[in-house]
Image (cartoon, helix red, strand yellow):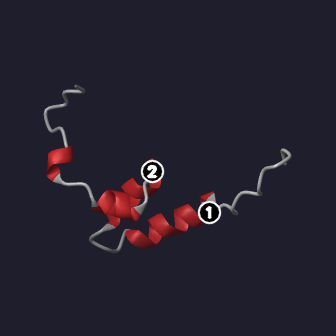
Amino acid sequence: MPSGKRPGRPSKSLTLRQAEAVLDAAERFPLSAYVTVSLLVGARTEELRALTWDHVDLKGNPN
């Protein structure tokens, strides 16, 4: 660790096996797409819940 630096917090990331288990379990529920997207993009649930349809570009225009 560099001098003068505090240690970081332990990782809360899922292992691959844990992520696969979550995806398998989520398949049975209506919010499975929500769980899948959050795992794939690495977004927190509170970040995803804040999104609205205004954030979606249905025309595919990257601007």
Q: Mark 2 is on which residue type? A: Leu
Q: Where does the image place residue 46, in percent across and percent down from the top left?
A: 36, 64
* Residue at point 43%, 48% (across, down): 41
Left or right position of 36 against 50: right
Regarding residue 33, the answer to whether it shows in the image is no
Which numbered disc covers residue 40? Answer: 2
Q: How many numbered marks does the figure carry?
A: 2
Left or right of residue 40, residue 1 in this image: right
Label 1, on which residue?
17
Q: Quadrant of the C terminus?
A: top left
Is the C-beta separation of discs 1 and 2 under 8 Å? no
Residue 32 horizontal/vertical position (percent): 34, 65
| Disc 2 element | helix
Look at 45% across and 50% down and name the residue there.
40
Amino acid type shown at disc 1: Arg
Q: How far apart in space, not on screen, are marks 1 and 2 (Cα)?
A: 14 Å
Q: Residue at x 84, y 48 (%)?
A: 1
Residue 9: assigned label:
none
Question: Residue 42: x percent and y percent?
Answer: 47, 52
Q: Is residue 50 above or below residue 31?
A: above
User: Circle 1 — which element?
Assistant: helix
